[in-house]
Amino acid sequence: MSATLAPTPQISPMPSDTASGLELISPDRTNSSAPQWFFERSANAWGEFQKLPVPSIKDESWRYSNAKRISLNSIHPAEAANEHLEAAAVAASEGLATAGARFVFVNDRLVVSETQGLPEGVVCLPLEEALQSHSALLEEHFMKRESFLGSAKFASLHLAHVKAGVVVFVPAQMEIENPIEVFHWIKGANAAIFPHTLVITGDHAKVSVVDHYRSDDGVVGLSCAVSDVIAGNGSSITYVACQELGNEGQALHLSSTTAQKDSLVKSFQAQLGAGFSRTESVSNLVGAGSRSDMLSVSMPIADQVVDQRTLQRHLAPHTFSDLLYKNALYDRSRAIFSGLIHVFEGAHYTDAYQTCRNLLNSEEAEASSMPGLEINADQVKCSHGSASSPVSEEELFYLKARGIPDAEARRLIVLGFLKNALGRLENEVVEAMIIARMEEKFARIAVQAAV
Amino acid sequence: MSLKITNLHAGLPDREILKGLNLEVKPGEVHAIMGPNGSGKSTLSKVMAGHDDYAVTSGEVMLDDINLLELSVDARARAGLFLAFQYPHEIPGVSNANFLRAAKKARLPEGEEIDAIKFYKEMYARMDALEMDRSFTSRSVNEGFSGGEKKRNEILQLMMLEPKYAVLDETDSGLDIDALKIVARGVNAMRSPDRGFLLITHYQRLLDYIQPDFVHVLMDGKIVHSGGRELALELEAKGYDWLKEEELATA
């Protein structure tokens, strides 16, 4: 494959006040050595992106939200950050106490790659490298997804621009003890990154992967991420996305899970940053006996908006899915949850559960929930429920009556509220990491309260 | 030095419940307040602790030389007041151990940390005294506890926090005799010349196991009668009506 096969890059128009960013700046793939199929898919996606309208608030899948929060006009694909910024990002990439492999990307450029902790035979490569060395595998699985939840335009944008991320393939029977950890940083103003994660397991393999998305406060930027997880028969995958963009950041995370026969997939969203974040998470239970746990915690503060869309697709009999989303809201923040359980014809003996709980720390915070069910099979057990409630005054009084100050009492209650979603991961190292990230957010809340 | 309540008037926004209550508990003393339902017993404990539902219209509550009514709920507790709740709340997701640590840490100077080994050693010793299983350290505060377990947990907190003055609000309610004995043993172990107790109770039974130095009768928001331990037995035998009549006669 050579660069000459790439579509001729369009020349970016001169910046204008109205549209000088992603709406017009086409992907630059002149230096890429990716295979032909990739160029074709990417170029098609760019065409699709330009054809598709920005989702309207009138679209059911954007109800209560606003795609206009994702401003593309002022944002351009991230350029390489200088050494100083890269070093700062690497220094601030604290996460798991023990990782099997570790990558740091800054502005979609690979800066750190440590894979010596992995056993031989496992594929764990930066996307650019994997496109060359495992072209056939990627051609089969890369972005072979449908956008069910409203962000087809942004999925196209991702595919058009994507160059960073990690591809993991764990061959049959192989179990990887320590998680693979990937950091994606946005550095510099008005930059967009397009992180990609693809995790594939062979039969009875086991792996966990953690993605971090980060940027500094005060910097406008967009992370438009896609993560696809494909679990082979009897295999087990834990996937964690931990989003901590600065307050001016916009975060999109489009993920899909495909669970084959008797596989077990746990996915966890920790949405802790960004002025606007939207997650679209789809679980495809395609094999009998498969199970998907969809978990999430968020702690929006100030005017942050957390927009969550989920879909549990039961396509085979004897499948199980259990979703638990927990949001602790502060200040004037908003959380939107919309989830659908869809049991297809023939997917008998399905168990599907969906719960969204919101804990309100402020009278001005607002949570909207839209649970849904569509059942076309027999012998199905399904339940869905959502509830919002303020922090209990009686619980607060009890803690304070033991001498615990108000802020600390609230921290304990919120942490307790969020913890049961965390406990479902059953992975101490990952849980400890997420709690540490949540403590960072609590520290911000305390600083804000003190001002 | 004492926990001193002077002419306390307090209640709900639309209803006065405490109508000029006076009481002084000195370190080393155990006082019991008894009274019929609706006399204001539980209101007194909540007003002292600083519950928002109640407003104080006049009067004073002094803990040694600290005016408690000027302090927030948590500051009152740190000043040395402990309230054992009649209905302890459940706090989902917060483990008993973390809760106690947070309460202990709140009493340390800023930036100082709890010595974890010492903390667990102390907690286990206290739990053993209360015949509490070690599993209670990792369980969420009061969640799924039986009535008796909740009350034992209150006494565990009392033992760990070592307040200057402890108010026990109907600690005997919902306890079978074995649990009552254990709870009483815990309280008795905490009796000391430096610590005062105020037991609020409906029944004389508790006072068989925690023997008070003074017994007061609370009726319609005021202490109407005070005496020694024998008063509790008299109330058990005669009820409260004779005091009502007595009060009417003196009015």
Image (cartoon, coloured by chain):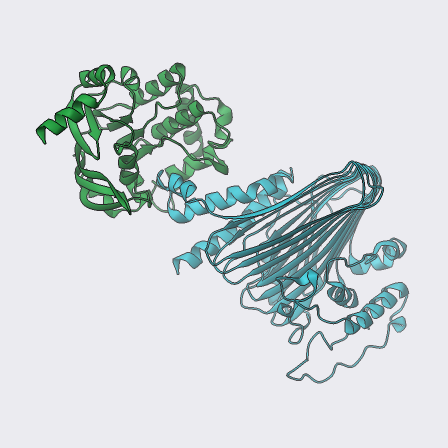
Q: Position of residue B154 (x, y in %)?
A: 38, 29
Q: Is residue A306 above or below residue B168?
A: below
Q: Is residue A449 left or right of residue A421?
A: left
Q: Is residue A346 left or right of residue B216?
A: right
- Name the one closer to the observer, B199 or A23: B199
In the orientation shown, which residue stands out farthest toward the left?
B250
Which of the 4 image quadrants contains residue A88? Answer: bottom right
Chain B in the picture: what colour?
green
Q: Position of residue A69 (x, y in %)?
A: 62, 68
Q: Is residue A323 left or right of residue B193?
A: right
Quadrant that contains the C terminus of chain A:
bottom left
Q: Is residue A197 above or below residue A343?
A: below
Which chain does cyan denote in the image? A
Instruction: Give the total of numbered labels.
Output: 0
Q: Is residue A97 above or below residue B139?
A: below
- Name the one closer to the observer, A391 or A174: A391
Q: Is residue B170 left or right of residue A250?
A: left
Which of the 4 image quadrants contains residue A38? Answer: bottom right
Quadrant that contains the N terminus of chain A:
bottom right
Q: Residue at x 63, y 72 (%)?
A: A190
Q: Can residue A72 be seen here?
A: yes
Q: Position of residue A50 (x, y in %)?
A: 78, 74
